[in-house]
Amino acid sequence: MTNFPDHGVLKHWPFVEPVVQIRLYDIFKKYPYMLLGVAILLSYVALVRYLRFSNINSLKAKYGFSDDSRSYEHMTVEQAQEVERNLAEWDFPFLFEFGWIIEFLKTASAPCISKALIETGHFTNVDPLIAHARQQDTVCLMTAMMAQPLKSEFSALALARINEHHNTYGDKINSDTVLWLSWMWMDGPVRWINRAGWRRLEPFEIHAMWIFWRELSVLIGCKYVPTYLHELEHFREEYARAEQKPSVDNTTYSDAIVDDILFMAPDIIKPALKTCVIAILDPDVVWANRYEKEFSPILRRILLTLLKAFGLFQRYFCLPRWRRRMLSPAELNRRGLVNFPDYTFPSTPFYVAPTFWNQWGPLALTSRLRGKPLHHARFGGNGVLWESMGAKLRDPAQQSKSEARVRKEAQDLISHPLGYRANVKFQRRSIITDKHWGKGYGSRQNAYTDEELAVKDRRYRK
């Protein structure tokens, strides 16, 4: 055996071959600071990993969730919302919101939706601020659906306001369409987190998303809601086959959404940014929204690679958030109204309280120079009532009655048990729901009747 000096740093490595020990000692002696830096880096990576997985590990320890489906088969709605809020407010706030915003463009891929929304004159108004206000209302109400504790006053008011709006335009809206949209808001964040996040979602997290959005679907009046996730996948495929198709209305509505998203971007780069937005759309959306000529598969691969690379960088080198990202207001302001964070939908200036920073900070000064609107009282900067959000009725008396109905329905939603199906005046017929699929989830109250499903059967027999 080769003789070598007994260096203290090596006495703890009896399993290392002597020649290797000598070489390691020589390297350590020659590059002490480099090895110290490597040791610090590895320690930092280990710390990041430990802290990044601390939230999900806490949920597992708290509820006993694991990869075994039996550990979460009886998950409650409250547990499901806690899991979802961890994804949206702690672990993946950017990708969660990103998934939602991209799904807005999928809503434009069905002509029955695009045509109805264009006819309202809100999302595609010639006045861009009216269109932006309507988009902001939608984002704020949907965010409240997800973030506000279920059965709380804020949650009930947001849900009731959505139902009131659907009642106003119920003759243009089908329950199956609303269920398809609800599936998007659940599925979009899941797909984008798994596609570009710093970790993939665990089975119990996907199950939690379904349990929570299943409950929301009956609360917003969907006449049929599947009991199991695989049934929802079947429903999604059937609906897409029946309703997702190319249309001029799709393009018009989709362009309006892109304009909302890119409103604050400099005009000179908007065409390039629009190309990037189109590049990350799913193929079915590109086809239905008639973006084939603007779609670049090479750019898509580049963008998805960059997003995934950023996710890996987060996983190993970025410490997790030290405070949760508040998505929806937790309390009323001093005027008894609600303000939203400026990052809820940063493309528009609505419902954000004016502060020195958002009036005179670097971005605010840039907006001033470019003539872009800032947060102000005329954009709801003093706050807004939950029951008044969304498209306003022209008659003030009718608007007042509408807000009173929202407050009353909110109390009804709070008082009823889980599984209660709200009464929303959707179109009476179904589009693709089949009576042979069974009763589905939720109370039979306000669900499809056999007669309403028979209308669908007669339509298809023709």
Image: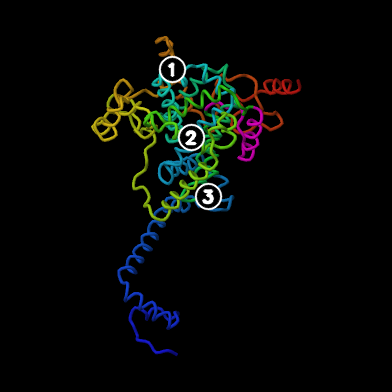
SS assignment at label 1: loop
Q: Amino acid at mark 2?
A: Thr
Of circles 3 and 2, which is in front? 2
Q: Is residue 336 visible?
A: no
Of circles 1 and 2, which is in front? 2
Q: Amino acid at mark 3?
A: Glu
In space, the residues marked 1 and 2 are separated at their CA atoms by: 23 Å
Q: Which mark is residue 202?
A: 3
Q: Is residue 280 left or right of residue 385?
A: right
Q: Is residue 81 left or right of residue 51?
A: right
Q: Quadrant of residue 382?
A: top left
Q: Is residue 99 magenta?
A: no
**Crowd band around label 2 with a 10 angstrom C-alpha radius: few (<14), some (14–19), many (20+):** some
Q: Is residue 230 left or right of residue 296?
A: right
Q: Earlier in the sequence, mark 3 or mark 2?
A: 3
Query: Does residue 310 lie above or below 146 as drawn?
Result: below
Magenta stretch bounds: 220-242
Q: Earlier in the sequence, mark 1 or mark 3?
A: 1
**Crowd band around label 3 with a 10 angstrom C-alpha radius: few (<14), some (14–19), many (20+):** few
Callout 3–callout 2 Cβ contact below 8 Å? no
- Residue closer to the observer: 284 or 83: 284
Q: Amino acid at mark 1?
A: Val
Q: Which mark is residue 126?
A: 1
Q: Which mark is residue 35?
A: none
| Residue 81 rendering spot, x and y as whole percentages | 47, 40
Q: In what quadrant of the picture does the N terminus appear?
A: bottom left
SS assignment at label 3: loop
**Crowd band around label 1 with a 10 angstrom C-alpha radius: few (<14), some (14–19), many (20+):** few
Task: From the image, give the main secondary structure of the stretch colored magenta.
Answer: helix
Q: Is residue 235 magenta?
A: yes
